[in-house]
Amino acid sequence: MGCKGGTGETGAESGLISDWAELTHECLLNILSRLTFEHRWTGPMFVCKPWLNACKDPSLNSVFDLETRFDSSTESTRWWTPEFERRIDAMLRSVITWSNGNLTEILTRHCSDLSLNFAAQRCPNLQVLSMKSCPRATDASMARIANHCRNLKQLDISYCYEISHESLASIGRNCPNLKILKRNLMNWLDPSQHVGVVPADYLNACPQDGDTEAAAIGKFMPHLEHLEIRFLKLSAKGLGSICEGCLKLEYLDLSGCANLTSRDILNSTSNLKDLKEVKKPNFYIPRSVFHTERYGHWRLYDERFQTDVFRI
């Protein structure tokens, strides 16, 4: 390091370079609060013990957000392994402990009943729970969430195939402030985008009781304003149950709901006065679904209209 002003005094000796470990706790919190959750976990926590302790401060652990990282990454087969799930569970349990009861948002994927049960016990102020693609999250943990996290306003249980209509009913009965529900399924019409990444047995376990789930939503979630049920296997009867019970809906996503027609949607939603946007089924019909010799009229349809999109 160079000398200062020709005096032979180095920067370190003059005090211009300080020990970062000696920063006050308040100063550290100010710095760390400007970082994302992911950045805190991949750097500052490993600098030194004072920095680790600062990262554990409850004020920095009111939100557990891994969804941003998941959403910006290409889905990997590794995500579906028990080892990866244990890592996510361990991270979530740590943040729950550090939050000291102040955790209000959980946004993740691939967690299990282990961490969800812990959240139910320790997070009475939870308002947002997004837990997509959790193959070992079940009705058992959701029942505990419903009983202990009654301030829930937003729930995303998309691609969680071990969660049934029983959880929807339980959440609806116990969480009157729920405004947003996302219960999307994987694209079962053309699963090619998931093949090779998602385990085959899980893809084949796609829930079949769409009308039962729809009935639970319509009966127990009257205050919903935003509902996503992409690729849910429901009929006109199921959609009718939702629209009769959820009169405050403003947004409804029915993409991929192949059993619904435009007439079904129009008839069912006609009484939703606050409805601003409906996403209707509009999906690709893969060639593999139809045997070309037996269903030659699909080829004719493509030739005449030069399109691979079939709008119901």
Image: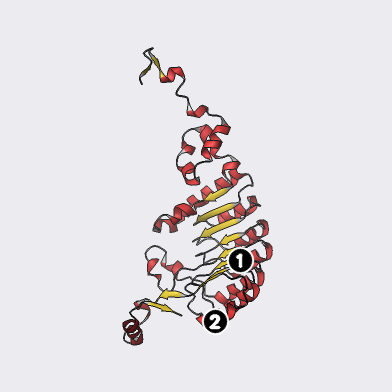
Q: Quadrant of the N terminus?
A: top left
Q: Which mark is residue 225?
A: 1
Observer-nearest of 143 and 234: 234
User: Farthest residue toward the top?
Assistant: 7
Secondary structure category for the residue under label 1 = loop
The percent position of residue 13, horizontal first and vertical second, equals 44, 17
Residue drawn at x 51%, y 60% is 132
Identify which residue is drawn at 53% across, 32% down.
Answer: 50
N-terminal of the two: label 1 or label 2? 1
Reading the image, the residue beneath label 2 is 264
Asked if 218 appears above or below 21 in the picture, the reply is below
Q: Which residue is found at the position 63% from the left and 51% from the top?
A: 123
Question: Label 1 crowding class (10 Å Cα cut-off): few <14, some 14-19, many 20+?
Answer: some
Residue 97 in the image: state x and y as whole percent: 59, 45
At 62% from the left edge and 70% from the top edge, which residue is drawn?
Answer: 274
Image quadrant where residue 78 sits: bottom left
Residue 49 vertical placement versus 103 (above, below): above
Is residue 18 depicted above or below 233 in this figure?
above
Residue 246's image quarter?
Answer: bottom right
Percent from the top left, x then y, of residue 26?
A: 58, 33
Residue 16, image quadrant:
top left
Alpha carbon separation for disc pair 1 and 2 = 20 Å
Camera sees residue 50: yes
